[in-house]
Amino acid sequence: MAAQQTRARPRVWVSRPLFDDMTDRLREYFDVQAETEDHAWTAAQVGEKLRDMHGAVLGVSDPVDARAIAQAPRLRVLANTAVGYDNLDLAALTAAGIVATNTPDVLNEAVADFAWALLLAAARRVGEGERYLRAGRWQGSSFHLLLGGEVHGRTLGILGMGRIGQAIARRAIGFRMPVIYHNRSRLEATVERECNARYASRDELLRNADYLVLVLPLTPANRHAIGTAELALMKPTATLVNIARGGIVDDAALAAALSEGRLAAAGLDVFENEPALYARLPTLDNVVLTPHIASASLDTRRAMAGVAVDNLIAALGFGAHAGRPPNVLNPEALQTSA
Ligand code: 8YV
């Protein structure tokens, strides 16, 4: 400890309110500048904040571009509080020898739970029912009130079968739903068996799924992976669920399909231009909308924050894993910065 106090303390920026005990852990090692309110930071603002920092804990919508990296000569690590990292220019970080980390695994189950929450809510018209009641429109029982789609026994399709996709699939066993999936690479037979899931081509998945859940990372190749052409392949009775990233779905094409009866319903936690919504979406009754909260159970968010803090402390050479942060996205940078 004494040795640590004589060393110049690295400077760390925490871009959003975290949990106080986690910020306090950072303060044991670093001079911490922690934001006390959420901001929708622009890339230029993030760049300004990072200028004199050695490290930062970032939120998933805090953009870091090549320009910000070029003007932050001391920067050694960015710890994202998310499994996704499409907010980071990873190539530029790597070229500059700056380590980037994420928070995989700890959120798998919470996000899978939430995918089911959206699937069920969209299929069984939970949002519409609540709006109907709150508007004082319920005049008594009606046999035909808010008839929804059947869930149990129908086919669940999963596009992107990583650890979160697999957690979603395992839950389908209780609903006795056949599961088909498409992924860049096919899963091992033992994992397919455990998930009760069958590999399908992308087209077969789109054509046959009654419920299609998207669990893809946002990459240039995945932008608008679901657009007009893909929606046209889907059953008009199908429901789409996106808990992955905005931009994977063409929101305008989706809104058109939903309003023209070419798709039954959708459950969306993520949007193309967050926090703005494509204007037509909230006017539609057959879509359930939530503000990017799939991982937002208290325990999971605490676990994510803890992982991000551990990564940052380790990357700056402190703590039990000094020099070996557990969740490095660009190991090449770790070699450069070592
Ligand atoms: C967000 C997510 O991190 O992990 C991800 O990639 O998108 C989420 O878990 C979380 O919602 C905080 O913004």
Image (tube, helix red, strand yellow):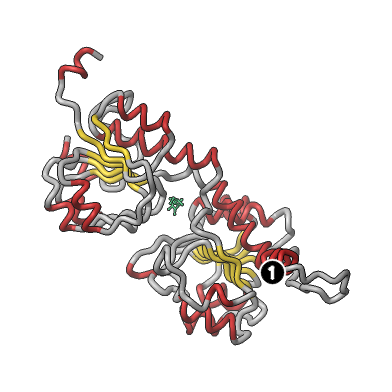
Question: Residue 153 versus residue 238: which sits nearer the camera?
Answer: 238
Indicate if the residue with disc 1 has its beta carbon within 8 Å of ligand 1: no
Residue visible at 47% across and 44% down in the picture: 105
Which quadrant is home to the C terminus? top left
The image quarter in which residue 31 lies? top left
Q: Secondary structure at mark 1?
A: helix
Estimate the x, y position of residue 107 in percent, counting from the top left: 50, 45
Estimate the x, y position of residue 22 in percent, counting from the top left: 40, 31
The correct choice, above or below, for 17 with respect to 205 in the image is: above
Estimate the x, y position of residue 209 in percent, counting from the top left: 62, 72
Estimate the x, y position of residue 321 in percent, counting from the top left: 31, 28
Q: Which residue is mark 1?
A: 128
Residue visible at 36% across and 35% down in the picture: 309
Which quadrant is home to the N terminus? top left
Question: Residue 49 versus residue 1: which sits nearer the camera?
Answer: 49
Is residue 117 something that shows in the picture?
yes
Left/right of residue 162 with respect to residue 204 in the rendered view: left
Is residue 186 something that shows in the picture?
no
Q: Residue furthest top?
A: 2
> How many C-alpha atoms fall within 10 Å of the one at disc 1: few (<14), some, or many (≥20)?
some
The correct choice, above or below, for 304 with respect to 20 in the image is: below
Residue visible at 27% across and 33% down in the picture: 32
Q: How many marks?
A: 1
Left/right of residue 179 with respect to residue 186 in the rendered view: right
Left/right of residue 249 with respect to residue 309 in the rendered view: right
The image quarter in which residue 15 lies? top left
Q: Residue furthest front?
A: 136
Left/right of residue 268 with respect to residue 77 in the rendered view: right
Residue visible at 44% across and 62% down in the picture: 245
Say which amino acid is labelled 1: Glu
